[in-house]
Amino acid sequence: MTPFTYYNPTRIEFGRDKENNIGKMIAEQGVERLLLVYGTGSIKKNGLYDRVIKSLKTAGIAYEELDGVVSNPLLSRVQDGIDLVKSHGLQAVLGVGGGSVVDSAKAIAAGALYEGEVWDFFINKAPITEALPVYAVMTLAATASEMNGNSVVMNDATKQKYSIASVLLNPKISIINPDLMATVTNAYLAYSAADIIAHTIEVYFTATDHPNFQSRLVESIIKTVIETTEILLKNPLDYDARGEFAWASTQALNGLTGSGTGGGSFPNHMIEHALSALFNIAHGAGLSIVIPAWMKWYKDKNRPQFERFAKEVFGLHTAEEGISALENWFSSIGTPVTLEEAHIPRDRIDEIAENAHGLAVLWGMGEEYPSETIARILQNG
């Protein structure tokens, strides 16, 4: 195993009704005023908003609200949140929703203590040196934003979907209650499954070192996601399956699976960010198109690991069989595997590739992924 440091400061509170105590938990950390961030209104329809507000009021925590966060979160809305924090002297940010909401909360937490533009962090113009504490109540399992310091935001002016990462942005406390995820549609369950799988196989296939233990962690997560997705498509109210799906999602990108692997990169996410930036499709839907397309292009660079994937996950033998099995599974659960299924015109591939290459350069992958290579990968989808 390659030497590594693993540190994760997030406290997870998992289980039924945990959200009812979020105010008390935050107050115990000395917070008296915070920004509540949420999406387009679903938490008000299902009663979660009322329970969170009651918990904050009972704990004596004052709050301001920022709603309207969308599935591909916008920089402009993040800036609105930063302005609220600064004008009201708020001390923390609480995100109640899915990964986009929590990612927005993190970006706000970083930008609130910075004198420049928060986008500076996303283009590596400035490092994150301080941030307000972040808290989370999750309503969707997909991004693992509840237990990492990552945030993805789209600059609505430039159509660039970029990310930041800092342990300073790890939520202090995250609530994972599977009951809060029971109303997720089958479509978004499928997209979430693709996202979780992407988080694990990126490093699994691209890292320079592949310890058996780390590979087995990845394989276990993927098999759990496949198994529980199929259960939940038939019975969305299965609490145990929902809980395992949610916990697998958290483990997929909390830093654990990549430890000791000698690095690795995230080319699937790099390419997909261009798809969702330009066409506003769900992140997981974009990934289910990109993953098989990229695997077909990349397989000969690490054929032994692709053969292992085929055997351990699907009980097959060749790299090609494993890729086909995953692509067919994506199709079976209803998430797209071609550009046509996502209504993305093929005559836009060069534009997508150029957009993605900008992120590749920022992530230090520009030489391996010039625009021409990205376009060639997308032709597989």
Image (cartoon, rainbow, N blue to C red):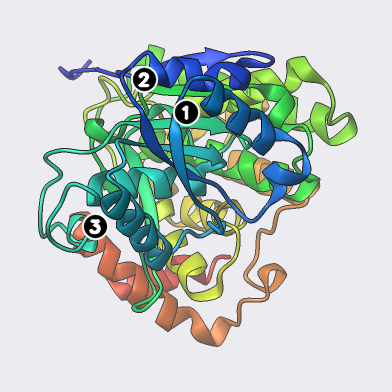
Question: Considering depth in this image, is 344 or 171 the residue closer to the camera?
Answer: 171
Quick one: label 2, few (<14), some, or many (20+) residues within 10 Å? many
Question: Considering depth in this image, is 369 or 167 the residue closer to the camera?
Answer: 167
* Image-based side of 207 in relation to 271, left or right: left
The local secondary structure at tag 1 comes to: helix
Looking at the image, which residue is at 69% across and 14% down? Answer: 16
- Earlier sequence position, callout 2 versus callout 3: 2
Q: Quadrant of residue 178?
A: top right
Separation of residues labelled 2 and 3 (CA atoms): 22 Å
Residue 92: image location, x then y, percent? 33, 35
In which quadrant will I find the C terminus? Answer: bottom right
Q: Which residue bears the numbered disc 2?
A: 10
The local secondary structure at tag 2 comes to: loop
* Image-based side of 133 in relation to 309, left or right: left
Residue 327: image location, x then y, percent? 66, 49
Q: Which residue bears the numbered disc 3?
A: 122
Q: Which residue bears the numbered disc 1?
A: 252
**C-beta proximity under 8 Å, tags 1 and 3:** no
In which quadrant will I find the N terminus? Answer: top left
Q: Is residue 319 among what the camera can see?
A: no
Q: Quadrant of residue 3?
A: top left
Residue 268: image location, x then y, percent? 43, 53
Q: Is residue 235 among what the camera can see?
A: yes
Looking at the image, which residue is at 45% across and 40% down? Answer: 63
- Earlier sequence position, callout 1 versus callout 3: 3
Instruction: Indicate which disc residue 158 carries.
Output: none
